[in-house]
Image (cartoon, rainbow, N blue to C red):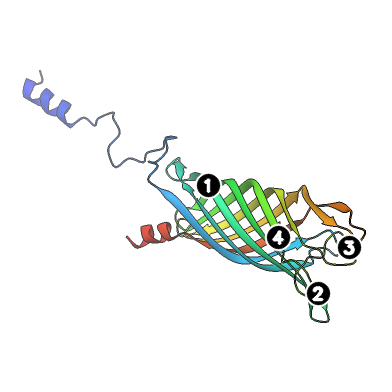
Amino acid sequence: MTPPSAISSIVSTTPSDSPSEDSPKYSTSSLPLGEHSVNLGVGYGARDMNNGQGMDHDGVHFSAAVGPNFRFLNDRFKVSPQFKYDYQSLNKDLGEKVKSEAEVHAFCGQVNLGVAILPKWLSVHGVFAVGAALYSSPDTKDGEKGGTEFNKNAQKMTLDGTALRIEPGAALCTGNSALCLVGSYAIDSGLSITQETIDGGPQTYSVNPVGMTLGVTVDPLAIIGLVK
């Protein structure tokens, strides 16, 4: 017969069925809202201004996107709803020191979905943004400075209007998304421009620019997290 003291010893050394604090935790619950992304980007962009010449306007591109991060399944998946602003400069050399110029300010809501291939070191992301794109160009007085060539018009005209922006994109990131290579394709629909004609009557033009951006983004908050 086993002594009571031995039975007590066996029970006390039996492993607990409850998970230890060191066990991996796979949960669909999100991290606290205190974790955010601040993505600052710079790169190159081009637009097709409906001149039948492809992406004939191009220039520098800047962007900024901020929002909370929600992580799932032991940080393997990340969902980030964000507010995004981007700026695109557009230029085209028409020859004889004449340029077609425009700039675009876009304000969008976007969702960034990330999957970690190698935790911390490599992740791929799909991005989808919807918002408004505001087109403008300097007024052209002498036919040389200011104005934009669009819709195969024989002369440049002042561009001033708002389009619906739909922008899918993708990113390849490292360092917990501290540094990313980003590409996107912007579809701007419904840009309506009204110009006064020579005989004094107004004429409305419909422009639907499309184009791409390619650049890099950095996240200062992710960089601080890596250094800590």
Is label 2 or label 3 in front?
2
**In this figure, which residue is indicated by the disc labeled 4?**
136
- Distance from disc 3 to disc 1, alpha carbons, whole Å, reads 38 Å
Q: CA distance from mark 2 to mark 1?
A: 42 Å
The picture quadrant where one finds residue 149 is: bottom right
Residue type marked 2: Asp
At horizontal 70% and vertical 53% (from top left) the residue drawn is 186
Mark 4 or mark 1: whose residue is earlier in sequence: 1
Q: Earlier in the sequence, mark 2 or mark 3?
A: 2
Q: Dot 2 corresponds to which residue?
A: 142
CB contact under 8 Å: marks 4 and 1: no
The residue mark sitting in front, 4 or 2, is 2
Quadrant for the N terminus in the image: top left
> Element type at marker 1?
strand
Pointers 3 and 1 in contact (CB under 8 A)? no
Residue occupied by mark 1: 82
Q: Kindly identify the residue that appears in the image at 77 percent across and 62 percent down.
A: 158
Q: CA distance from mark 4 to mark 3?
A: 17 Å
Q: Point out the tag, 2 or 1, that comes first from the N-terminus.
A: 1
Callout in the foreground (4, 1) = 4
Residue 191 to residue 153: above or below? above
Q: Residue 13, image x and y in percent?
A: 17, 32
- Describe the element under mark 4 as helix, strand or loop: strand
Q: Amino acid at mark 1?
A: Gln
x and y percent of residue 178 in the render?
A: 46, 60
Q: Residue furthest bottom?
A: 96
Q: Which residue is mark 3?
A: 153
